[in-house]
Amino acid sequence: MNDGKIILEGCGLHSGKNCRLVIERCDSPEILIRSGNNELPLRMLKTSGTNRGSDYAFPDGTTIRTCEHVLSALYGLGMLSGLSLNVEGGEIPALDGCSRILCGELDALGHVGNEPPALEVHEPVMVCGNDRTRFVAAFPSDGLHVTYTVEYEHVGAQVYDYTHSPENYRENISGARTFAMKSDIEYLRAHGMALGGSLDNAIVIGDTIEAKGGLRWPDEFVRHKVLDLLGDIASLGRPLNAHIIAVRAGHELHLRLAEKLKGE
């Protein structure tokens, strides 16, 4: 942190190019996103997602890639107002492949502003993948609860139940790192993705699990999916009171759910 600002630099996970993120206090009751001459509240940017990340676009087409981890930290710590995020290089720096480093920086910066009122879910809302074996749904609830289920080759099925609080987020979610299947890496790099990926910021799943320092939890994979989900629902620009149930979902479904909730 530098003079009340958080300045983070490093390569983008997909572009492999140097990127810079500056977070600083502002007077807005919302999170503001800046890139070049563009500035908009977070909730007004157009979102798009694949299983490889969540991107945010301004009306002129300027896009910021892989926003999910920084937004997850903001949602996780209840810091959804009074901050501006200025991104240089078109992508958020990959850092440690999770949100642990950023949480430490945000804690040092301190809370600013008042968190916006929560969005309440009054009726179930669900979005499904094309084969209907993948879905994410939001049900009425006091506070935010998440039940996430994943299944991967070499890993098997994992389920994680999460009740949201900043303390729970810091301790059990923020350190869960992103991951990729070893069999996918060549394809990803041939298509301009994962060019900045390494064991410093990701886990590789193959016949063996490659993770710097070993896995932090046996179920680190599903915990990271919870981290991603929280980053994607941050696109609402406000907290969410719901019980979210996700089965083999990903960024695309997370963001589709958020867009659907915006219209409720």
Image: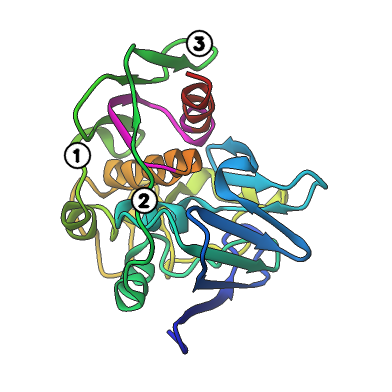
Tell me which numbered mark, 3 or 2, is placed earlier along the sequence: 2
Q: Is residue 40 left or right of residue 98?
A: right
Amino acid type at mark 2: Tyr
How many C-alpha atoms fall within 10 Å of the one at disc 1: few (<14), some, or many (≥20)?
some
The residue that appears at 48% across and 30% down in the rendered structure is 258
Residues drawn in magenta: 238-254
Q: Which mark is residue 75?
A: 2
Q: Residue furthest bottom?
A: 3
Where is residue 112 shown, x and y percent of the image? Answer: 37, 66
Residue 131: give its label.
3
| Mark 1 or 3: the one toward you | 1
Horizontally, residue 84 falls left or right of residue 101, namely: right
Q: Position of residue 232 (x, y in %)?
A: 46, 41
- Marks 1 and 2, Cα distance to the nearest angstrom? 14 Å
Instruction: Choose the circle earlier in sequence order: 1 or 3.
Output: 3
Horizontal arrangement in the rendering, residue 212 relative to residue 196 (left or right): left
Position above or below: 244 against 162: above
User: How many residues crowd around disc 3 within 10 Å: few (fewer than 14), some, or many (20 or more)?
Assistant: few
Residue type at tag 1? Tyr
Dividing the picture into quadrants, the one containing residue 35 is: bottom right
Q: Residue at x 46, y 62 (%)?
A: 82
List the residue tagged with mark 1: 162
